[in-house]
Image: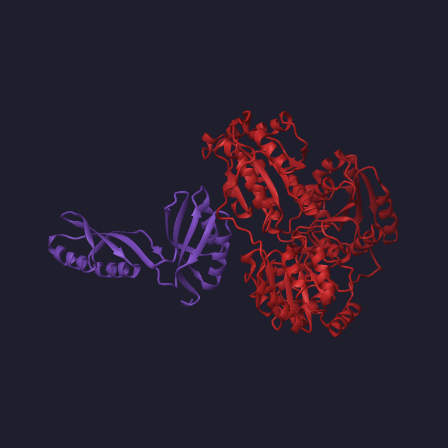
């Protein structure tokens, strides 16, 4: 399957903060064979609404239908595809690596290059906190993989439109 | 003003009353007792109909809604009572039928703890409802009922489920029964974009061979009179979908009848040869398209639909108009000139003469013969319910509908067992009209227990069981595409349907010979003492034509039985 047929998309969905909303949204994806890669849900400024950022992969021609079906859900106020716009997209990752004092300075050098914070340090391990666009986190993962990665947790993308435009 | 404290169940009934509900179809059970009790303790004009199975209740509400355009209410208990509504919810959801289903539920604090008769009906039904609620506060009942009716009946209609835990329906309700809705995410298209209308009018005025495809959306929006005015002004031929039967008179000179898999040859030929297709409220179902990528490929396609998600779902139109069908047509009429379609109509009239709907009058008793005769004897004025299968397609072909609300058939879901309860629901709604249910011996046995409901209420329904002792449509496919290997279709062991009817106190007739069709049907029509059943012992192995094999292009339509071996169909079912 080529990239054109199947690609990653980032949607932001503004929903009423009610029980069952997430299940309904997940069902729209599942029914059409789209895989949700990451999902971030948090209350909006107005607490009666929530904001979801969903990264998903699947055939491009199905996405238009997914957005329409999501928009149709009673509790969804709007759904926007940010894949091709210039929105701010950020993600946070925590990487725990196995490293002793011998490798520590090199690990810290890599961490510094990627603007990481060291949030936990023991004689045998450290946890790095990285914030940035997903590609940056991918790159850090690759560089740091010369050490043994014990655990790697990513929050998933959050997205926000620039300037006066609303997400 | 302080409200007198009432129970949640009483609030439910009073809110339903406020919504103008006439009938509740249902089946009682433990978790729903407070609501059933409220039917007695609340002063109400709502009539409750006790069915024999929850599936019957949902299809009755469905039939009621299709026959009136108004929603009916279903009331059942939790667990299996609730899950038995699933097929009916799917049926209504697929065909955009308004309906409110109230389910009892275990007490709130037992949710998720496998209480007796607990089922997560809110979760189970999510894909087959327009929306659903699990009520958490008794005081939310008025708002939720109001919202449920609003959602169910506006825009593209559909079923809404309200799951009410027993402590909620038994708890005190102090809320104002005329509650405000809170639906910030629900907007309905109420306007028509004028530029789009002008664009459509422009395209129509350039067209030499225009064709209107009228679907259920046109019916739901009440566009029948507007459509007729448009068609007669612009002289555009009309074909209709299965659920669009009656939105434009099928006996009109410009009508081509139903299109699609078992549609008329002339409607399908019109699809192949038109240069413009104006789809008003049809979702381009796969039974119509055959092969989507070649469907009307040389024609300009215009799609009017209230549901934005239908635009481009199956077919990408050149012009899309997201609007209510009636409003769009009303806006369009003044901009569309009278078109010169004489040549086009002459051609289509030629097809009507050359490829009429037909059946052999010789040989055994045929379903087509019975339906055709019933059509004539009832002057085309009956409210027709069908089940699903061969008889459904023949009923669509031979029972012409000239007005809306007179065709009740499960289109999208293809639900066997739908016909009888739907017919009963329609008869409750319109007791003074003639109601007929064409049903096969297979589907009839799925919900025949509702004969009790029909008998008890002495409903004026004629149940025509077209009995070929087979699941005929599947057998037809096996004959045509699977080298005649019949599998799982022989309904041996059918009961004597006349005796069965009589055991419910329902008059039964047997019809075995072609020569008796008119006499027996007339006797059935003359029977006025409640429902009657006509068991028709029809030919076992007749096949429905014309036929477009699933997934094949409309051009590949088989007008007559094929003489060559056919490939297995590529399309869905």
Percent of width and height locating residue A39: 37, 51
Nearest to the observer: residue B392 or residue B399: B399
Nearest to the observer: residue B455 or residue B499: B455
Please report the residue visible at 71 percent of the width from the left and 56 percent of the height from the top. B224
Question: For the N terminus of chain B, which image quadrant?
Answer: top right
Residue B5's place in the image compared with B386, above or below, is above
Percent of width and height locating residue B271: 67, 68
Please report the residue visible at 18 percent of the width from the left and 60 percent of the height from the top. A113
For this view, does B9 lie left or right of residue B406? Answer: left
Percent of width and height locating residue B207: 66, 73
Residue A42's place in the image compared with A91, above or below, is above
Residue A142 seen anywhere in this rendered image of the structure: yes
Question: For the C terminus of chain B, which image quadrant?
Answer: bottom right
Please report the residue visible at 78 percent of the width from the left and 36 percent of the height from the top. B458
| Image hue for chain A | purple
Q: Which chain appears red?
A: B
Please report the residue visible at 63 percent of the width from the left and 27 percent of the height from the top. B42
Percent of width and height locating residue B272: 67, 70
């Amino acid at each position: 399957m080529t990239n054109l047929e199947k690609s990653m998309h980032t949607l932001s969905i503004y929903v009423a903060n009610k029980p069952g909303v997430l299940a309904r949204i997940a069902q729209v994806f599942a029914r059409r064979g789209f895989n949700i890669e990451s999902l971030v849900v948090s209350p909006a400024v107005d607490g009666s609404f929530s904001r979801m950022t969903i990264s998903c992969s699947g055939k491009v021609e199905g996405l238009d239908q997914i957005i329409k079906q999501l928009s149709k859900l009673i509790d969804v106020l709007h759904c926007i595809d940010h894949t091709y716009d210039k929105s701010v997209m950020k993600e946070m990752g925590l990487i725990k690596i196995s490293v002793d004092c011998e490798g520590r300075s090199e690990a810290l050098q890599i961490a510094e290059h990627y603007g990481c914070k060291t949030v936990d340090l023991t004689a045998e391990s450290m946890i790095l906190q990285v914030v940035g666009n997903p590609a940056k986190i991918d790159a850090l993962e690759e560089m740091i993989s010369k050490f043994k990665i014990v655990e790697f947790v990513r929050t998933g993308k959050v997205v926000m439109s620039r300037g006066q435009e609303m997400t | 003003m302080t409200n007198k404290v009432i129970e949640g169940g009483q609030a439910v009934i009073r809110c339903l009353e406020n919504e103008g509900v006439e009938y509740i179809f249902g089946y009682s059970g433990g978790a729903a007792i407070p609501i059933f009790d409220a039917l007695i303790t609340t002063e109400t004009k709502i009539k409750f109909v006790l069915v024999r199975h929850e599936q019957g209740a949902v299809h009755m509400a469905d039939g009621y809604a299709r026959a009136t355009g108004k929603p009916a209410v279903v009331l059942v208990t939790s667990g299996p009572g609730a899950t038995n509504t699933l097929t009916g919810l799917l049926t209504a959801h697929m065909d955009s039928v308004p309906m409110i289903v109230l389910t009892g539920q275990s007490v709130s604090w037992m949710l998720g703890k496998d209480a007796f008769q607990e089922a997560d009906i809110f979760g189970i039904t999510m894909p087959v409802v327009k929306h659903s609620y699990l009520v958490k506060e008794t005081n939310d009942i008025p708002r939720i009922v109001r919202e449920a009716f609003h959602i169910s009946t506006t825009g593209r209609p559909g079923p809404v489920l309200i799951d009410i835990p027993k402590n909620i329906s038994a708890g005190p309700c102090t809320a104002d029964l005329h509650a405000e809705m809170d639906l910030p995410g629900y907007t309905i298209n109420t306007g028509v974009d004028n530029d789009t209308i002008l664009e459509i009018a422009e395209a129509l005025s350039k067209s030499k061979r225009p064709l209107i495809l009228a679907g259920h959306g046109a019916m739901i929006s009440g566009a029948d009179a507007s459509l007729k005015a448009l068609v007669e002004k612009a002289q555009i031929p009309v074909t209709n979908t299965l659920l669009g039967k009656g939105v434009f008179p099928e006996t009109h000179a410009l009508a081509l009848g139903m299109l699609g898999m078992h549609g008329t040859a002339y409607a399908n030929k019109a699809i192949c040869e038109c240069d413009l297709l104006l789809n008003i409220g049809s979702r381009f179902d796969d039974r119509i398209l055959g092969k989507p990528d070649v469907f009307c490929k040389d024609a300009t396609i215009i799609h009017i639909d209230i549901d934005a998600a239908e635009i481009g779902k199956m077919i990408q139109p050149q012009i899309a108009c997201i609007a209510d069908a009636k409003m769009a047509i009303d806006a369009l009429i003044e901009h569309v000139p009278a078109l010169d379609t004489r040549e086009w109509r002459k051609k289509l009239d030629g097809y009507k003469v050359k490829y009429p709907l037909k059946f052999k009058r010789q040989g055994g008793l045929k379903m087509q013969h019975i339906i055709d005769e019933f059509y004539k004897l009832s002057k085309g004025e009956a409210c027709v319910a069908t089940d699903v299968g061969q008889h459904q397609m023949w009923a669509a072909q031979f029972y012409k509908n000239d007005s809306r609300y007179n065709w009740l058939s499960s289109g999208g879901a293809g639900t066997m067992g739908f016909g009888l309860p739907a017919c009963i629901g329609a008869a409750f709604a319109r007791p003074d009209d003639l109601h007929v249910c064409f049903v096969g011996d297979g589907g009839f046995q799925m919900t025949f227990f509702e004969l009790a409901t029909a008998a008890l209420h002495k409903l004026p329904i004629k149940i025509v069981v077209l009995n070929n002792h087979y699941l005929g449509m599947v057998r037809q496919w096996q004959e045509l595409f699977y080298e005649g290997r019949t599998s799982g279709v022989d309904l041996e062991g059918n009961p004597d349907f006349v005796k069965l009817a009589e055991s419910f106190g329902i008059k039964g007739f047997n019809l075995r010979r072609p020569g008796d069709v008119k006499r027996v049907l007339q006797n059935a029509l003359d029977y006025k003492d409640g429902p009657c059943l006509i068991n028709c012992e029809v030919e076992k192995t007749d096949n429905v034509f014309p036929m477009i094999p699933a997934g094949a292009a409309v051009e590949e339509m088989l007008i007559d039985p094929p003489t060559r071996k056919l490939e297995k169909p590529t399309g869905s079912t």
